[in-house]
Image (spheres, coloured by chain):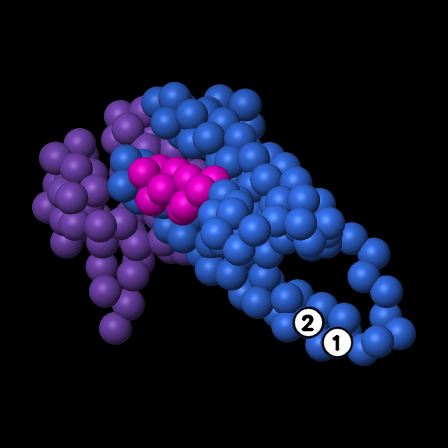
Chain colours: A blue, B purple
């Protein structure tokens, strides 16, 4: 049985989860940036504004559902434990970076170069954490 | 928790990958259990005991 996230021998569940994870990640970024651009004009009515602001949350819920589905179906308890640890690392990194940038961007002279999405930061952090965990336990 | 997994596996001439395939887990899981970095759940411990035809307490021993 090939259950290993550190090489290309992914189980069907892992492959499917990675695909869903990636698709939701891209979808979140696209929807967030699109709605942000639309709101720049300021010509959006209030009901539409609230409705459109909800759009980027759909793939975020999708990411959470994908992770929950994976954890519920993963039969390898060690890999499951590694993924849970990586999720905690991802949360920690996201909170830390968000707090740091929040403080930094509060200063009027600091220019916001790029919009950084917390969910993207979280997903990338989790991905890196999984890689490091698997490398340590190779 | 200490365990004799490496010894039991070596007695049968199995690689970590062989044991992982028999247990239907990843090779990393077997390696982590052998090196004491991960304690298996009761179902997996029972599976190991059945596989080696040995009581659980002869595979895993308390460090205390």
Identify the residue at image location x=60%, y=35%: A26
Residue B22 in the figure: left or right of residue A120: left
Q: Quadrant of the C terminus of chain B?
A: bottom left
Local secondary structure at mark 1: loop
- Mark 2–mark 1 distance (CA, rounded to whole Å): 6 Å
Q: Crowding near pointer 2: few (<14 within 10 Å), some, many (20+)?
A: few
**Quadrant of the rendered structure where residue B9 is?**
top left
Residue A20 in the figure: left or right of residue A31: left
The answer for which chain carries disc 2 is A
Q: Residue B35 in the image: x percent, y percent?
A: 42, 51
Residue A136 in the figure: left or right of residue A101: left
**Viewer-closest of B29 and A42:** A42
Answer whether residue A55 is visible to the viewer in this image.
Answer: yes
Instruction: Please identify the residue farthest to the right as the structure is shown.
Output: A109
- Where is mark 2, residue-wise? A102
- Check residue A137 in the rendering and tell me which mark sits there, or answer none: none
Q: Residue B30 in the image: x percent, y percent?
A: 37, 39
**Viewer-closest of A26 and A51:** A51
Q: Crowding near pointer 1: few (<14 within 10 Å), some, many (20+)?
A: few
* Magenta region: A58-71
- Where is mark 1, residue-wise? A106
Above or below, A124 against A24 in this view is below
Answer whether residue B13 is visible to the viewer in this image.
Answer: no
Q: Quadrant of the N terminus of chain B?
A: bottom left
- Does the CB distance between marks 2 and 1 fall below 8 Å? yes
């Amino acid at each position: 049985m090939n259950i290993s996230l550190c090489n290309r021998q992914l189980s069907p569940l892992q492959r499917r989860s990675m695909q869903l994870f990636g698709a939701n990640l891209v979808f979140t970024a696209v929807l967030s940036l699109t709605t942000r651009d639309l709101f720049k004009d300021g010509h959006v009515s209030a009901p539409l504004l609230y409705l459109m602001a909800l759009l980027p949350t759909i793939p975020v819920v999708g990411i959470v559902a994908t992770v929950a589905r994976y954890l519920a179906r993963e039969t390898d308890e060690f890999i499951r434990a590694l993924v849970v640890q990586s999720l905690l690392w991802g949360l920690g990194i996201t909170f830390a970076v968000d707090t740091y940038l929040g403080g930094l961007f509060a200063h009027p002279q600091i220019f916001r170069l790029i919009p950084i999405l917390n969910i993207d930061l979280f997903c990338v952090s989790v991905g890196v954490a999984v890689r490091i965990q698997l490398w340590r336990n190779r | 928790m200490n365990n004799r997994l490496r010894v039991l596996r070596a007695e049968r001439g199995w690689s970590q990958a062989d044991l992982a395939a028999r247990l239907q887990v990843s090779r990393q899981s077997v390696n982590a259990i052998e090196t004491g970095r991960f304690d298996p759940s009761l179902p997996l411990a029972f599976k190991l005991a059945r596989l080696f035809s040995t009581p659980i307490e002869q595979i895993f021993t308390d460090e205390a």
